[in-house]
Image: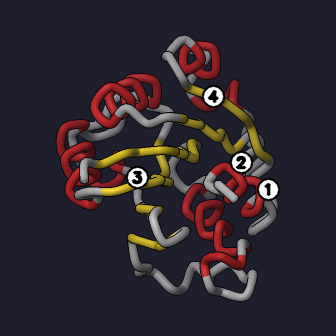
Amino acid sequence: MPVLLERALFVVAPQDSGKSTTLRSLFRDRRFGTNGMPLPSEQRRLPEVYHLSNERRLYLRLTSPHESGETPKQFIDKTKDKMRSGRWCFAGPLQPEPYKKMPDVVASVRAFSEALEPERLRVAFLSPDRHSRVLGDFFPPHDLSQELLSIEGVEVLCIDGRQKGKNGLLLADFLDFT
């Protein structure tokens, strides 16, 4: 069976802004088997693959390819390698600006979308982030939201990242097919 990427979700903010904490809040959804409790950030290593149903899995990545020093090709190849066959969802962090070997969020999302062809792709900016910075502060003078919306099939939203664990169900709903 070939790979079908149904949903892709990126949480975007600068380094040390709460992206992985926000992704961990997905575990507020009881489907992840944590009794509705987000996993503490002290628990560094989490499994990367979760079953959302009998037919559908989630590849959850908590470290951005920017921080890992990956190129876009390495990031995409690693993602493809994790999702060998079947129906999949993806959730992971990105940084708005180019860093190390990765381009900015717009080029990163475009490359991901072209390579993996998700049915739906959503970009969730932490705005304000945990330091109360807003989207316009991330990568001026670019209008990142507008640039992302110019990519076919991309949706953009902003969520308040100032409080830990508050947006998990909002994000998990994007992965819900029931």
What's the CA distance linking mark 1 and mark 4? 22 Å
Q: Does residue 21 appear left or right of residue 74 in this picture?
A: right
Judging by the rendered image, the residue that carries numbered circle 3 is: 64
Q: Which one is in front in this view, the residue at disc 2 or the one at disc 4?
A: 4
Give, as a three-letter code, the residue at label 4.
Answer: Glu
The colour mode here is secondary structure
Q: How crowded is the residue under tag 4: few (<14 C-alpha within 10 Å), some, or many (20+)?
A: some
- Residue 4 occupies quadrant: top left
In the rendered view, tell whether residue 142 sits above or below residue 89. above
Residue to which mark 2 is pinned: 129
Marks 2/3 in contact by CB < 8 Å: the verdict is no
Which quadrant of the structure image shows residue 97? top left
* Tags 1 and 4 touching, CB below 8 Å: no
Q: What whole-number distance in Å separates the C-alpha atoms at marks 1 and 3? A: 20 Å
**Amino acid type at mark 1:** Arg
- Mark carried by residue 162: 1
Q: Earlier in the sequence, mark 1 or mark 3?
A: 3
Asked if the residue under mark 2 is in contact with the one under mark 1, i.e. CB atoms within 8 Å, the reply is yes
The residue lying at 34 percent from left, 38 percent from top is: 99
Q: Nearer the viewer, mark 2 or mark 3?
A: 3
Label 1, secondary structure: give it. loop
**Residue nearest the viewer, comparing 62 with 173:** 173
Given the image, on which type of amino acid does mark 3 rest? Ser
Q: Secondary structure at mark 4?
A: strand
Work out how far the residue at label 2 is from the one at label 3, CA to CA, in angstroms. Answer: 16 Å
Pointer 4 or 3: first along the chain: 3
**Residue 82 sits in quarter:** bottom left
Work out whether mark 2 precedes mark 3 in sequence or the reverse, and give the earlier one.
3
Residue at the image point whose x is 75% and y is 67% from the top: 164
